[in-house]
Image: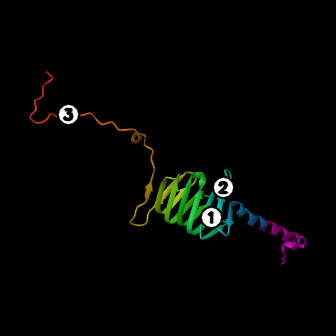
Amino acid sequence: MFRCTYNQLLSCPPMLKSQMHRLGLAIMLPVTIITVTLTGKLSTAQSSGGNRPLTIRADIQEYDAKTQVITARGNVQMLYPARQIQATAAQAQYFSKERRIDFSGNVYILQQGNNSIRAEKVTYLIDEGRFIALPQSNRQVESIYMIEDDDLSQPTSRPTTKPTPKQGSKTRSPL
């Protein structure tokens, strides 16, 4: 088996050069999908087409090139500006092939700056723009939605009622 350093690449046998080239491509391909900054433990996943960033911060992150799944653990924070979504959780997994994000552990999601979900587990289906939330056992999911209601912004009209005659007063009959 031949071993070559980068500086010795020119003198390596052609077959080894080819293997190193493939290895370089295999290493670089995930980099186009995920960018990792070691100091901030930040990753940005981008889908082909729109190239809209999905930023994940966590204590620990792993990327499986075979399954194309990013797993983030510990103080997970996700920002997806294209959909106006911010999320926090104990763990998150981004399934790039399925275009799905699974959050677990004290999940809080804020969407469009107003609407929110609190649950133990939440799945976000990116293409459908749909959340599926599950609570801890013996608890409930909490969602808060800000609803625009034009009827409440206008003054309400009070129903007109006929005054009731006082006791002992005489009323005239319309006849």
Which one is in front, 85 or 161? 161
Please provide the residue range marked out in magenta. 1-23
Quick check: is 16 in the magenta stretch? yes
Dot 1 crowding, Cα within 10 Å, few <14, some 14–19, many 20+ = some
Question: Mark 3 belongs to which amino acid?
Answer: Pro
Q: Which residue is mark 1?
A: 69
Which one is in front, 82 or 173? 173
**Which residue is located at x 64 percent, y 68 percent?**
41
User: Of discs 2 and 3, which sits in the foreground?
Assistant: 3
Q: Which residue is mark 2?
A: 47
Q: Earlier in the sequence, mark 2 or mark 3?
A: 2
State how far apart marks 2 and 3 are (Cα): 69 Å
Picture quadrant of residue 101: bottom right
How many marks can you see? 3
Q: Which residue is mark 3?
A: 163
User: Of discs 2 and 1, which sits in the foreground?
Assistant: 2
Q: Classify mark 3: helix, strand or loop.
A: loop
Question: Mark 1 belongs to which amino acid?
Answer: Val
Q: Position of residue 28 (x, y in %)?
A: 75, 64
Whether tag 2 and tag 1 are in contact, CB under 8 A, the answer is no
